[in-house]
Image: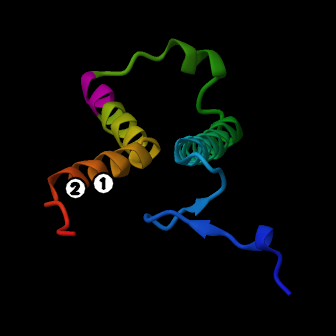
Amino acid sequence: MTDDRDRVEYVQSGRPRFFADPVNDQLLAMITALLGEVCVLRERLDTVERLAGQRGLWRPEDVDRFEPDPAAEQARDALRKGALARVFSVLNEEIARLRHSSTREPENR
């Protein structure tokens, strides 16, 4: 016997639905995407710091004083835009869905 509470419902994009209000599901998906970005970033930063420390490459205060050149700024901008696109993809999907539904011809009744 399956309890109705054990069944997972899914929205059209294939993500699970947890809340009655779809806006809450979208917010949860965005927060989860953002958390994923932060976790990956922290793991990579930890790796870099450990490797640098093991090899005596630089001190933490050297990182604090670093000023990126234009090429580094451009690369960082691309990384930032990619992260924002992943985090806000939930909203972009909804916008696309709404645009698509508003351009469809009404069904004949």
Asked if residue 73 is among those painted magenta in the image, a careful observer would answer yes
Which residue, given by chain and number where applicable, does mark 2 sit on? 100
Q: Is mark 2 on a helix, strand or loop?
A: helix
Query: Where in the figure is residue 47, as x and y percent of width and height?
Result: 65, 45
Q: Residue furthest top?
A: 65
Give me the disc on residue 97.
1
Left or right, 17 with reference to 104: right
Please, which colouring scheme is shown? rainbow
What residue lies at 17% left-to-right and 60% top-to-bottom? 106
Crowding at dot 2, Cα within 10 Å, few <14 / some 14-19 / many 20+, comes out as: few
Magenta stretch, main secondary structure, is: helix
Crowding at dot 1, Cα within 10 Å, few <14 / some 14-19 / many 20+, comes out as: few
| Of 43 and 107, the residue lying toward us | 107
Left or right, 83 with reference to 101: right
What residue lies at 61% left-to-right and 47% top-to-bottom? 32
Give the quarter of the figure containing the N terminus: bottom right
User: Based on the displayed image, in which of its 4 quarters is residue 95 positioned?
Assistant: top left
Q: Give the range drawn in magenta.
A: 70-74
Give the quarter of the figure containing the C terminus: bottom left
| Of 78 and 1, the residue lying toward us | 1
Query: Where in the figure is residue 74, as x and y percent of width and height?
Result: 27, 30
Circles 1 and 2, Cβ within 8 Å, touching? The answer is yes
